[in-house]
Amino acid sequence: MNPYVPDALPLTELDFRRLLPLVGQANAALARYDGLLQGIPNPAVMLSPLTTQEAVLSSKIEGTQATVDEVLEQEAGLLKEGEKFQDIQEISNYRQALFSAREYLKDYPIRLGFVRELHRILMNSVRGQDKTPGEFRKDQNWIGKHGCTIEQASFVPPNPLQLPDYLQAWEHYLDSDDVDFLLQTAVVHAQFELLHPFKDGNGRIGRILIPLFLYQKRALSQPMFYLSEYLENHREDYYQRLKAISVEGDWNSWIVFFLQAIVTQAAQNSARVTAIQALYEEMKLAIQAATHSQYTVHVLDAIFSKPVFRSSDLAQQLFQEFGIHEKTTPGLLRQMRDAGILRELQAGSGRRPATLCFPRLINLAEGREVL
C-alpha cells in the first residue's frame, strides 16, 4: 500500500448544499453552550470534573480502561501501582496537557512547536514514552492488525520525508479563515489524524486540538468543549469516516459526521454544565447552613476542583491560597461530612490523614452512581 498523499487545504470540492444546513444547526448549538459557559464565574474550577471525564473518554477510545473516580482516587493517593496505574497515568497526562494548553492559548496561537509540547506531556512516563515524545516521526509507520506488514496495512500515513511540508501547510491552514469555523475544525482534526505525525498518541492530540482551535477562533469563551463522549459512543463510524477520506476522498461524509457530533455533544455538554452550576449553587447554601463559615465559597471551589482529596492537602491548599488557618479546616470538613455533603473514603489513622470525597459531583461527571 502506498503512503497517503493529503489533499491541499482549503478543500475546494465540498457539497455546501448538503453541509450548510448542518453548519447552521451546529453553530446554534455551540453558541447556546458557550452562552452557559460565559455565565459561569470560574469555569476552570467548576468544570474541572468535565475535563477529567474528557481525558478518561479520549483515552478510552485508544483502549485505556479507567474511570473518573479511579483517576481522582489515584491523585488523592488511594490507588497504588497496579494493573491500572499506567492507564490512569495516561489520563492524568491528558488532563495536564489540556490545562497547559489553556494557559498557553491566552497569549499565543496554535503552532507546531506547541503541538509537540502537548505530545511530550501526554507521553511522559507512560507506555509510549519510547516513541520519541515531543518529536514528529522520522520513520514510515502504518495502521493495521497487530504485527501486520505495510502491504497488509489498512492505512499508511504520508512519507516522513514529506511530512514536514504537509505539517507546515496544516499550520498555515490553522491561521486562515475558511467558509465556516466549525467546518474548518472538522478539516483540521481529520487532516491531523491522516498526517499521523507522531509514532503514538495522534488520536488524543487530535481530539485535544478541537476545543483549542475553537477557542483560538473565538467560537468559545473557554477552551472547554469536549467531543470524546460522542466519538467514543460512535467509535466505528468515527474511524470509518476518517478512512473514507483516505480511500475515497469523501470529505463531505466526514464533515457531516463531525457537525452531527457537535450538535449532539453541545446539547449533552449544556445539560451537564447546567447541572453542575445548579449543584454549585445548592452546595453554596448547604455548606453555609452546615458550617456558618465565612470561607464557604473557598471551600466549595476547592472540593469542586478536586472532589477526592486528603484532608491535609485541602487544609494546605486553603492556607496557601486564602490564608485560612490549617486548624480551621478539620472542623469545616467534619461539619460537611456530618451534613452528608462529603463522604469519608479512608479514615485518618496516626499520621495518615483522612481521604474524603464529594460524591454528588463525581456521580454527575461519570453520568452514573459510582459513590
Image (spheres, rainbow, N blue to C red):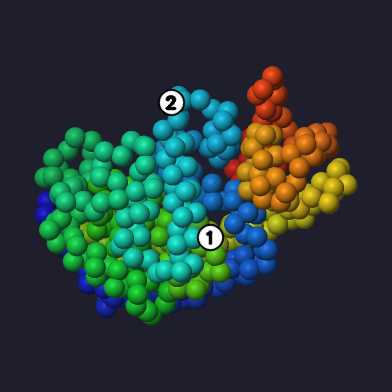
Give x and y (percent) for residue 113: 31, 60
Residue drawn at x 41%, y 33% is 86
Above or below residue 113? Residue 83 is above
Residue drawn at x 73%, y 33% is 343
Give x and y (percent) for residue 316: 66, 40
Disc 1 designates what residue? 224
The image quarter in which residue 357 lies: top right
Query: What number of labels is visible?
Result: 2
- Tag 2: amino acid: Glu
Res 349 visible? yes
SS of the residue under disc 1: loop
Is residue 99 or residue 240 the one in the foreground?
99
- Tag 1: amino acid: Met
Q: Is residue 73 left or right of residue 284?
A: left
Is residue 327 or residue 290 the one in the foreground?
327
Give x and y (percent) for residue 233: 47, 48
Is residue 35 or residue 232 the one in the foreground?
35
Q: Which dot marks residue 83?
A: 2
Res 254 visible? no
How packed is label 1: few (under 14 Cα within 10 Å), some, or many (20 or more)?
Answer: many
Q: Assess whether mark 1 and mark 2 are in contact (beta carbons under 8 angstroms).
A: no
Residue drawn at x 66%, y 47% is 320
Disc 2 or 1, which lies upstream in sequence?
2
